[in-house]
Amino acid sequence: MTFERFLALVDNHPRCNILYDPSHMLLQQMDYLTFIDIYHARIKAFHVKDAEFRPNGRSGVYGGYQPWLNRAGRFRSLGDGQIDFKGIFSKLTQYDYDGWAVLEWECCLKDGDTGAREGSEFIRRHIIPVSGRAF
């Protein structure tokens, strides 16, 4: 409901759009795939960023600051986290998304050079060329 409230405050302005970042939604325990179904017309950019959420008996969504490796929610290199990128790229393709898929990299384990090298290839493998015909 937060985005609807924001849209109401700006009178549903056509330039009020979304930079879709599923990593933050996963860390908030939101359904990031259904979010695409609801807001696809407003998604104009896409941060391709992975994350994982590992709650335990001491830490959860609001677990407070922990060392990077011990956080319940932490960012990971593409493919090392829990984000369903095949599902995301499929849904965005289904809705004729024509914006950018931008690598945003943070990882609690890998270094940046490795993340950039692996990330660009990861994105390339997930882009879906749309068929101009049916069977």
Image: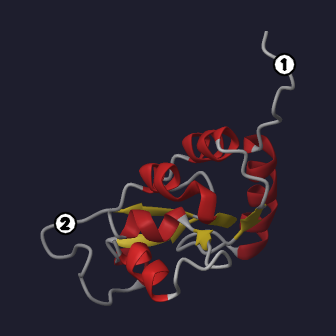
- Residue pictured at 35% horizontal, 76% vertical: 70
Secondary element under disc 1, as helix, strand or loop, is: loop
Q: CA distance from mark 2 to mark 1?
A: 49 Å
Taking 125 as reference, is 15 above or below it? Answer: below
Residue furthest toward the right? 132
Taking 83 as reference, is 100 above or below it? Answer: below
Percent coordinates x, y for residue 67 in the rendering? 38, 86
Q: Is residue 46 visible?
A: no
Instruction: Look at the image and tell me in which quarter the C terminus lies.
Output: top right
Quarter assignment of residue 134: top right
The disc label shown at residue 17, or none: none
Identify the coloring: secondary structure
Taking 66 as reference, is 26 above or below it? Answer: above
Residue at which label 2 appears? 56
Secondary element under disc 2, as helix, strand or loop, is: loop
Query: Would you call the spot at circle 2 few (<14 residues within 10 Å), some (14-19), or many (20 or more)?
Result: few
Q: Is residue 135 left or right of residue 9?
A: right
- Residue pictured at 45% horizontal, 88% vertical: 9
> What's the amino acid at mark 2?
Asn
Q: Is residue 110 visible?
A: yes
Residue at which label 1 appears? 133
Taking 55 as reference, is 98 above or below it? Answer: above
Query: Would you call the spot at circle 1 few (<14 residues within 10 Å), some (14-19), or many (20 or more)?
Result: few
Percent coordinates x, y for residue 80 in the rendering? 55, 54
Taking depth in this image into account, of 21 and 110 the one nearest to the observer is: 21
